[in-house]
Image (spheres, rainbow, N blue to C red):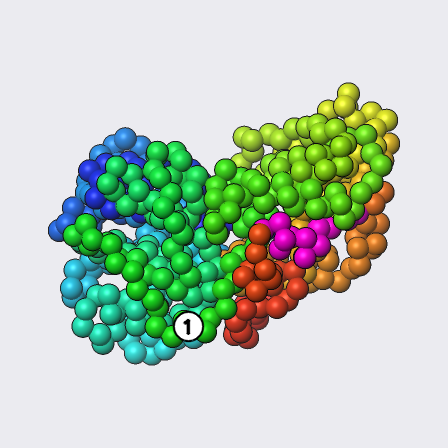
Amino acid sequence: MKEYCGVFGIYNNPNAAYYTYLGLYALQHRGQESAGIAVTNGERITYYRDFGLVSSVFKNESLKHLTGFVAVGHNRYSTSGASDSPDNIQPIVVSYKYGQMAIAHNGNIVNALELREKLEEEGSIFRGTTDSEVIVHLIVKSKKRKFLEKLMDALSKLKGAYSLLVMTNKKLIAARDPWGFRPLCMGELDGSIVFASETCAFDLIGAKYIRDVEPGEVVVIENGEISSYQIPGCENCKKSQCVFEFVYFARPDSKIFGKSVYEVRKEFGKILAREYPVKADLVIPVPDSGVVPALGYSQESRIPFEMGLIRNHYVGRTFIKPDQKMRDIGVRVKLNPIPELLKNKRIVVIDDSIVRGTTSRKIIRMLREAGAKEVHMRISSPPTKWPCYFGIDTPTRDQLIASSHSIEEICKYIEADSLGYLSLEGMIRAAGGNKDSFCTACFDGNYPLSVPETITRQAEKK
C-alpha cells in the first residue's frame, strides 16, 4: 500500500506561499514524489513545482518569488499517470479565455479514461497523463457562462474520488466528491480560511479546525465571503469514506471524518485484543503505523508494551538490492530488533496490514533470530483482498495474499505461531460509524460505485 496525495490551500494571507509550504511539510506522508505551490496576487497566478520532498523542492529563494494572498499546494504520489513526467506535477496551472486557474487533486477519477477519450475526440490536447488534467479540460470546455457553473458542470460528470482545491485569479474553491472517499478539512488562521487533507497541517501553522468539507459540497471563497453549494445529481450517492485512512494513511495526530485518528487506531488494538487474545510476555509494534494499535492491544490485554523493533527513519524510497542476499537485508535496513528485550519471550507483533506476506515473514524470522520464543502476529485491519480504485496505489488482486489464501495458510506462510485479523465489524465499531458510511471495498469487494472494465484491466497490467 502506498500513499497518494495531500492538498493544502489558504485564502487572504500575505504569507500564503510560506504557510502552504508548512502545510505541505505536515502532509509529506501523503506523497513523496513531487511537490508544488501556486499563488495569486489577484491578477496573475505564479507557481513552482518539482520532483522531490517539500524541503528539497522549496528553498527561501523560490518561496520569495511566490507572492500573493491566495495559494494552493500539492504533494504527489502517483496513483494515476506516469510518475516521471514533470507535466504530471501539481498544482496544474492553465491560462484560458477568462483568466487563469490552478487545481490540486487528491483521489482517483474512475471514468477519467472515458472522459479523456471524448475530450480528445473534440480537440482537447493533454500535456500530461493524470486524471486530474481531465477536470481542467471539463471546466474549460463547459458551455456554462460563469466559472462556478462551469466547475459544477465538470464535477457532475466525474465518478470517483476527489478532494479538490481550485484557485482562480481571485477565488479559492474546495470540493469533495459526493461519496466523500478522501478527507478534506476547513480551518481558520487569523482571519484567513485554510483547507487541508488532514488537520495535522492546521496544527503546524496554528490554525483552528472549523469542520470537514462535506461529501458533495463545494465551498467558494471570494471577496472574503464564504458560500456553500451542492454538486448537482449527488443526492443519492452513498457516503463512502475510506476506512483505510484510519488504518494507515492519515497521521495519528490528525482528525479526519470528524474522528481522532489516534483514538480510532488505539480502539482497533483494544478490539483486536478482545477478538484474538493470546498468552504472551510482550506486545511490540511494527513501526510506525503499528504503534498506536499496539498500545491499545497492550492496555486491553495487560501485556507489557515495548518497542522491540526500531525503525530507521532515514531510509529513502529506493534501496538497491542486486541479489537475493541483499533483498533479504532490505527489511533490516528499515527495522532492527532489540535482542535483549526479545530473548526467550513470547511476542505479540502488531502491524496494520499484510499485503503480499513477504515482509511479515522476514520480520518474524528476524524476531526469532533475535531470540523470541514465540511470535504471534496480530493485524489491526481485516484481510486485504481487493484492489482500490479510488486513490490508493494497491497491488492487483493476484498479489494480495489474502485474496487466495486462508488465514491458516497465511499464518503458515509468514511462519507465525498464530495470526489474527481485526474483524470488519470491529473496525467499523472503532471508527465510530456504521458500515454504510465507509468504503470497505479493499476488504469485502463491495465497491460503492461501478468501476469501468478499462480501469480494472489497466490495473491488472501494472
Is residue 294 left or right of 415 when viewed as pictured?
A: left
* Residue position for label 1: 235
- Residue found 32% across the figure and 52% down from its top: 91
The answer to which of 271 and 115 lies nearer the viewer is: 271
Q: Position of residue 13 (x, y in %)?
A: 22, 40
Name which quarter of the figure residue 55 lies in: top left
Q: Secondary structure at mark 1?
A: loop
Taking the image as shown, residue 15 lies to the left or right of residue 105, namely left
Q: Position of residue 232 (x, y in %)?
A: 34, 72
Residue lying farthest left? 43
Where 76 sits versus 389, above or below?
above
Residue span colored magenta: 419-431
Say if residue 83 shows up in the picture.
Answer: no
Q: Amino acid at mark 1?
A: Glu
Q: Is residue 397 above or below residue 346?
A: below
What residue lies at 47% left-to-right and 49% top-to-bottom? 258
Q: Look at the image and say whether residue 373 sits in the magenta stretch.
A: no
Tally of numbered tags: 1
Image position, residue 307 (x, y; %): 68, 28
Mark 1: few, some, or many residues within 10 Å (few <14, many ≥20)?
A: few
Q: Nearer the viewer, residue 36 or 23?
A: 23
